[in-house]
Amino acid sequence: MKLGVFTVLFSQKALPEMLDHVASLGVESVEIGTGGYVGNAHCPIDELLQDETALKNYEKEFTSRGIMISAFSCHNNPLHPNKEIAQEANETILKSLELAKRMNVPVVNTFSGCPGDSEDAKYPNWPVAPWPNDYQEILAWQWEHKVIPYWREIGREAEKRNVKIGLELHGGFSVHTPATLMRLREAVGDVIGANLDPSHMWWQGIDPVQAVLYLGKAGAIHHFHAKDTALDVNNMNIHGITDMQPYTNMLDRAWQFRTVGYGHDMKVWADIISALRLVGYDYVVSIEHEDGLMSVDEGFTKAVQNLQPILMKEPLGEMWWV
């Protein structure tokens, strides 16, 4: 396994400065934003696709430092009922797939998106209750007419380029649990997999170890995010897991994102890393910083310090004791 970071947290730094900074802390891999909600501060994607010299110079920024790119990420909503938003998201995904092909980056991460409740909708509609039956009807329409058809088309584009798609299981989108990920994968193919982030499992009441085992046995983990979640039991009893308060209202929220080790202890994280190895995941563990109680540098540094001792880097040997 390699330790990585999702570099959107250092968007204010120029690419060379950012790479030098993360490399100095022992990071071996970076996940680069190519647009959407995360922006493209470290990836002028249009220029790179149009100018071969610019692309080669861009590649040298990474290879000269011995840093690999684990994934290009363009988290957005390509199923948004607003056609302009959906079109922009779709174009960014296609550009990211093409750039990944040219740079031999194996994964493009994004969200599944979430449609509205009809062709006339203005906003996404995320059904999370089976009754009243209207929600079941909305859900069936979304998957049959929007989610599956769209990702079948994008899946074909990804397969042409030999690139995998890592969908982050995130609330507010059609694919947000291991089961919904597998539903889409079964409809589209193995090109679809998870960019698995434990933080979004915990707040939904899902044990990340079990999510790793379930998805990993199917070979459905394409990428992995390292981010923690702290649950406040008292606030959870008041607001529930679908707490709609702003993330900034940290004192009253039912849950909040934390850096690795500040929501769950390192034994829990060691169990997650062990489960990843058990199912054959031997790729990047990419730190994502969204901790409202720590600065970017402190949260990132603590995540690096906590993860380095528990990552398993050496190849497995024979069981000499059996």
Image: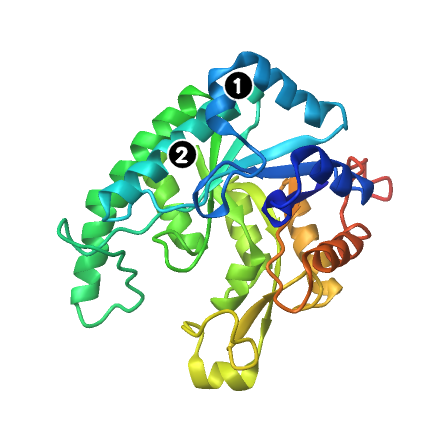
Q: Nearer the viewer, residue 209 or 106?
A: 106
Q: Name the residue located 35 percent from the left edge and 48 percent from the top edge.
A: 113
Query: For residue 156, what is the image quadrant?
Result: top left
x, y (%) of residue 149?
Answer: 25, 37
- Classify residue 223 as left or right of residue 161: right
Query: For residue 198, what is the image quadrant?
Result: bottom right
- Around disc 1, counting alpha carbons within 10 Å, would you say few (fewer than 14), some (14 to 19), or many (20 or more)? some
At label 1, the amino acid type is: Arg
Can see residue 283? Answer: no
User: Which residue is tagged 1?
Assistant: 102
Quick one: quadrant of the C terminus? top right
User: Which residue is tagged 2?
Assistant: 92
Total label count? Answer: 2
x, y (%) of residue 291?
Answer: 62, 63
- Classify residue 216 as left or right of residue 268: left
Q: Name the residue located 23 percent from the left edge and 50 percent from the top edge.
A: 142
Q: Name the residue located 45 percent from the left edge and 43 percent from the top edge.
A: 110
Q: Is residue 222 above or below residue 208?
A: above
At label 2, the amino acid type is: Thr
N-terminal-most mark, 1 or 2:
2
x, y (%) of residue 85?
Answer: 30, 44
- Give the spatial CA distance, label 1 vs label 2: 15 Å
Query: For residue 2, what is the image quadrant?
Result: top right
Q: Nearer the viewer, residue 247 or 206?
A: 247
x, y (%) of residue 77?
Answer: 35, 46
Q: Residue furthest right?
A: 321
